[in-house]
Image (tube, rainbow, N blue to C red):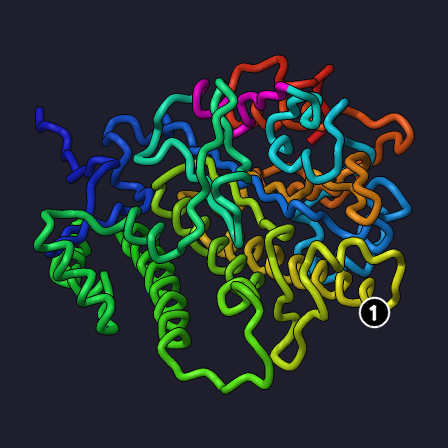
Amino acid sequence: MNAPHIAKSFSRRRFLRGAGVTLALPFLECMRPVFGRAAQVKAPRRMLLISNNLGFLPTPFFPTATGRGYELTPTLAPLAASREEFSIYSGMSHPDVNGGHSAENCFLTAARGPTKSGFRNQISLDQFAVEKLGQLTRFPSLNLGVNIDKANRSLSWTRDGVLLPAEDSAPALFRRMFVQGDQAAVKKQLHHLDERGSILDTLTAHTKKLNHDLSSDDRARLDQYLTSVREVEERLLTAREWELRPKPVPSQAEPADIRDKKLIFDKLELMLAMAQLAFESDSTRIITLMVDAFDTPAFKLHDDESTTEGYHGLSHHGQAPDKVRQLADADRQQMVILNKLLQNLASKREGADRLLDRALVLFGSNMGDANKHDNTNLPIILAGGGLKHGQHHAFKHDHNTPLCNLFVSLLQHMGVEAGEFGSSTGTVAV
């Protein structure tokens, strides 16, 4: 009796290697054990948690109708192409998490009384999931930020209530994920990148060799993944080029930090591209991202327009028409960026599924109405995860449902055996 043919298989932790560079491979069909492919390994589940700490204008954000028949509001209109990929939740908040801006570090912890003397934060949703799931990837979680005050703000907190600093540099994150080796090789590779080189150029020979061992489906998956790496490299290169270009002589003194922080939406888009790449490479399965609007000075709205003041000042608009207009514009731009992320995740394949179907994406805020420092009725968008979306789930606006009820549902969807978290009293439909 002839022995069965055994195809060449690859370790999940196999890498492409070059001088000073190690690039993790995406999930390929050939990485499944040969005799176990029929049984199918458990598909990885992922979670991206995003917060803008000044929130959105509530009236243009929340739909008036509930269920599936709601009409997209002015703020949500840029998400029209992804309507069936996300759901809206209203009437949710964290009980006793108040004090306006003091609640920003509690968005994923639900720790009560942030303004009280002796307050100590508690474990955040992402770190709770990491504790329960264990280290499944090179990085158990990634904590990112845009314009973030790293010493004082974070979405990610340990069980002892210790702040985990956010990474706010896309190039540093890129190198952390993909560049390693001995000191001399790393130094040479970083110099190569600085001189318009590409990580992929150093991997060409190994990539060609690997392609000979892959099926047509896996070759297509690898090509798709390497294209994503290349796209992010091009983004980083473009940003570097702009830094090197001479800038026009201003007619007035330059505001503090505006050179870097005014491009808040470009930075958000780039960080979300990095988050997508981290998911594609399976570098991590849990990511948090705080958009620190509070720490953002006057910022670029369009190529020909910047805001008249910093984000925080605009948020206290007092119904002034021009401030409201600028904020509404900023809110819509973030939805444009979110829509691009959802479309990108939907276009990527992982096995038989879309990457979006394996990734929960939550975008919300600790602030229900920044103009009033109101921490109730929080704006929550939940997308992806293979869930049935396209609905507005509305809870009582005068007696909010704990947001942690949704968090418990997300944990369970991630495969965490949890019946409670934070201030939860149960679960909600997802």
Report the amino acid beneath label 1.
Asp
Residue 121 covered by magenta stretch: yes
Instruction: From the viewer's side, name the closer residue of 325 and 68.
Output: 325
Magenta segment range? 118-132
The x and y percentages for residue 197 are: 22, 70
Q: Residues within 10 Å of mark 1 (few under 14, many from 20)?
A: few
**Which residue is found at the position 75% from the left and 59% from the top?**
314
Q: Is residue 163 above or below residue 215?
A: above
Residue 405 seen anywhere in this rendered image of the structure: no
Whether residue 336 sits left or right of residue 35 in the image: it is right
Instruction: From the viewer's side, name the closer residue of 412 and 298.
Output: 298
Where residue 318 sits, quadrant-wise, is: bottom right
Where residue 365 sits, quadrant-wise, is: top right
- Residue occupied by mark 1: 322
Whether residue 288 sits left or right of residue 89 in the image: it is left
The quarter of the picture where the C terminus appears is top right
Residue 419 seen anywhere in this rendered image of the structure: yes
Label 1: element kind: helix
